[in-house]
Amino acid sequence: MSYLPYSTWRIGMIIACLIFLMLLSVLYAVSARSSSDLIAITILVFLVYYGFRAILIATGLDSPSPDYLFAVGTYEAAYVRTIFGISLFVSALVAFSQFGSVLAPRQGTLGFRKDRYSVASLGRLAGLLTTMSVTIGALLLIKYGSFGGVVVAAKVGKEFAGLGFIRIPAVLGAITSLAAFQDSRIAGDRRRAAWFFLLAIVNSAVVFMWGQRSIAVIPVAVLLIASPKVTMFGSKRVPLARMILAGVSVVSVALSLRYLRDSFTSNGSQSSFSEQNVWRQISQAVNGVYFDSSLLAFRDWPKIHMFRQGEDFIAGLLGPVPRLLWPEKPVPNLGVWFRQVYEPQALNGWPVGSVGDWYLNFGFLGIVVGGAFSGILIGVLNSNFRNAGSQGINQVAIFVYALYIFPQGITANSPLQAVAWGVPLWLTMKFLPPLRSTQETLQEGVER
């Protein structure tokens, strides 16, 4: 319970929020070499997942969600504590990313493709994967009768549990199509670029059949953030206006897809999502409720509940072991456990993000250590990206790392995500045939 007057806490929350936003701005200015490097995108992810909600709650445009857990006077002090914890994590991440850049091998390119590859071969691979993706999508449409029927089977009926592998062609199809799109942009071939972007949209639509909207964000981000102009020093920093446009576009796409998904799953009734105010709709559409979950974590741990002592990170490390070999292996699902603390019958979780993962397991010490480890890893990857160059597959890989494998840094689920997203991506990089001659380079229209 907060004992200071509510108006005093409101001012305190606004000041804390402003300090946090200023911190993100300074860290972005001093550490991001381009708008599409891993550090830059990680900071932008923090702004979307934490900063947006922090602004809404501090200014009173919205209250923390769910409302019944946040009566006035029960969260204001925790708000300042949460801002401090997130700021500590992102500061450690950015500071140690510089250390990671120093530790990285001088010519290291691990996680990226160094030598030039055949864009024609990449395009053919994208076409093959898209054909497989569309075939799988068509079979699902035939089985369930409609696009909405597939979404309901996936999100409500949970009928695709254990069948995640059939999404691989669509996911890889989207990634390879976007890489070919970016290479075509760099070469100045607008016709091919438009074709590959269309293939990326088709593959994203197939993935959306599973009710997953996040893959649809990557085409928008690559289109507006990844630079089509590449120099010998890498991609140029994208103008602020385009970054703002990218943010608005991502929010618009995510919000539209959330409405569309709910129209399929609500069975004609009005969904709870449509009944919420516009600010909360936007927040939930972009999965930007990490701040609300973190607010609960910083308020109730360790005051009411005990820290988890690394249990979730151990489960995450064991997650890639096939269930066929270990049927009773622990499941890395901190979000579901966290929500069930408050709503025991809930089946879906409340995501807590990287900051929440480390805090709920180890407290503030975990925030510092987790931020440091995340920063070192991101610094190494960023250095490798600069060494490898800004080929299309590398620019798309940056978004995969920032949004799926290491969202806001290392999470308890990162090992599992590395297998699900990283392995297919790395295999694609490895087996793309290299260019055989300078003449082939000129024929494909790709400038070194």
Image (cartoon, rainbow, N blue to C red):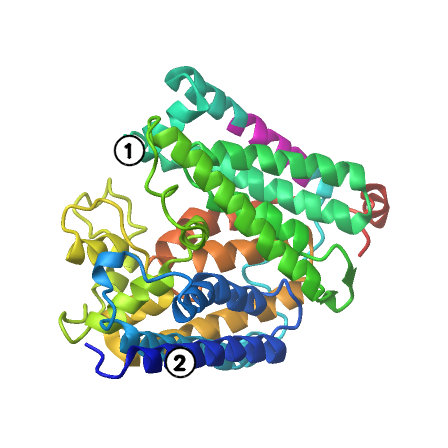
Which secondary structure, mark 1? loop
**Residue 2 is drawn in which quadrant?**
bottom left
Q: Amino acid at mark 1?
A: Lys
Q: Residue at x 69, y 59 (%)?
A: 242
Of badges 2 and 1, the one in the foreground is 2
In the rendered image, residue 148 lying in the magenta stretch gets the answer no
Whole-Å distance between the Cαs marked 2 and 1? Answer: 45 Å
349 horizontally vs 380: left or right: left
211 horizontally vs 322: left or right: right
> x%, y% of residue 219?
60, 46
> x%, y% of residue 48?
49, 61
123 horizontally vs 354: left or right: right
Q: Residue at x 55, y 34 (%)?
A: 203
> x%, y% of residue 444?
80, 42
- Can you see residue 97? no
Tell me the chief SS of the magenta region: helix
Where's the C terminus, which quadrant? bottom right
Q: Residue at x 38, y 82 (%)?
A: 12
**Toward the viewer: 120 or 86?**
86
- Can you see residue 3? yes
In the depicted structure, whether residue 251 falls above or below residue 133 = below
Residue 11's tag is 2
Where's the N terminus, which quadrant? bottom left
Q: Which residues are magenta?
A: 122-133
In the depicted structure, whether residue 153 falls above or below residue 89 = above
Q: Amino acid at mark 2?
A: Ile
**Residue 82 is drawn in which quadrant?**
bottom left
Which secondary structure, mark 2? helix
Residue underneath mark 1? 158
In the rendered image, residue 130 lying in the magenta stretch gets the answer yes
Going from N to C along the chain, the mark reached first, 2 or 1, is: 2
